[in-house]
Amino acid sequence: MQVSHTRAAVSAAFADASLIAHAGLVPVMRLAERCGLPRLVREKVRLTGAKNGAGASADAKVTGIVGGMAAGADSIDDLDVLRHGAMSAVFEGVRAPSTLGTFLRSFTHGHALQLHAVHRRFLGELAAHTPLLPGSGEKAFI
């Protein structure tokens, strides 16, 4: 059997201002906030010496990068995933990918160590808030 019509061009775009394509980000980012990610970044990360304002609002920028990565972003340009639909109604202070790229490019080795300190403390908070192995403190099999 042969189809008598040629295939039409198909394209899909997500641009509705009242919908969120990655609604699963809401509980993920709420957990990050409850575990203190923005607070830890404010306390530990200091980008001094950046003349272009890259160090301002480091907590919002790190949170945006984490949210973008959770939504599947694997490059700076992909962080644009947070700037569509109703994402701005759910997430405050969503930054442009170029702003996040400038922020990341201003990191030195010392700044990476500051972010690593945030990671260590955040991981401990995350483990305390999400017990994956209940009862593991009582008995462990090795």
Image (tube, rainbow, N blue to C red):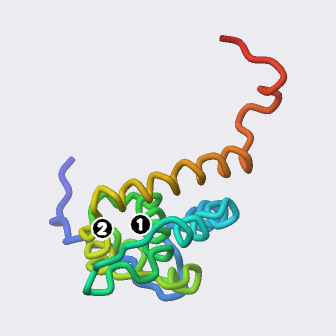
Q: Whole-percent x and y of residue 121?
A: 59, 52
Query: Residue 83, percent across and down?
Result: 40, 80
Q: Residue visible at 52% across and 67% down?
A: 41
Q: Position of residue 38 (x, y in %)?
A: 57, 70
Q: The residue under label 2 is which amino acid type?
A: Leu
Which residue is drawn at the image coordinates 55% and 84% (left, top)? 92
Of badges 1 and 2, the one in the foreground is 2
Callout 2: helix, strand or loop?
Answer: helix
Total marks shown come to: 2
Q: Are marks 1 and 2 in contact (CB under 8 Å)?
A: yes
Q: Nearer the viewer, residue 117 or 128?
A: 117
Picture coordinates of residue 63 (x, y %)? 49, 69
C-alpha span from label 1 to label 2: 10 Å
Q: Quadrant of residue 76?
A: bottom left
- Return the residue nearer the eye: 123 or 76: 123
The disc label shown at residue 65, or none: 1
Label 1 secondary element: helix
Q: Residue 5 occupies which quadrant of the picture?
A: bottom left
Q: Is residue 32 left or right of residue 14?
A: right
Q: Residue 65 sits in which quadrant?
A: bottom left
Q: Which mark is residue 117?
A: none
Residue under numbered circle 2: 104
Task: Give the residue type that dot 1 points to.
Answer: Ile
Position of 82 relative to 109 (above/below): below
Instruction: Quadrant for the C terminus, please.
Output: top right
Rate crowding at label 1 as few (under 14), some (14 to 19) or many (20 or more) other CA atoms within 10 Å: many
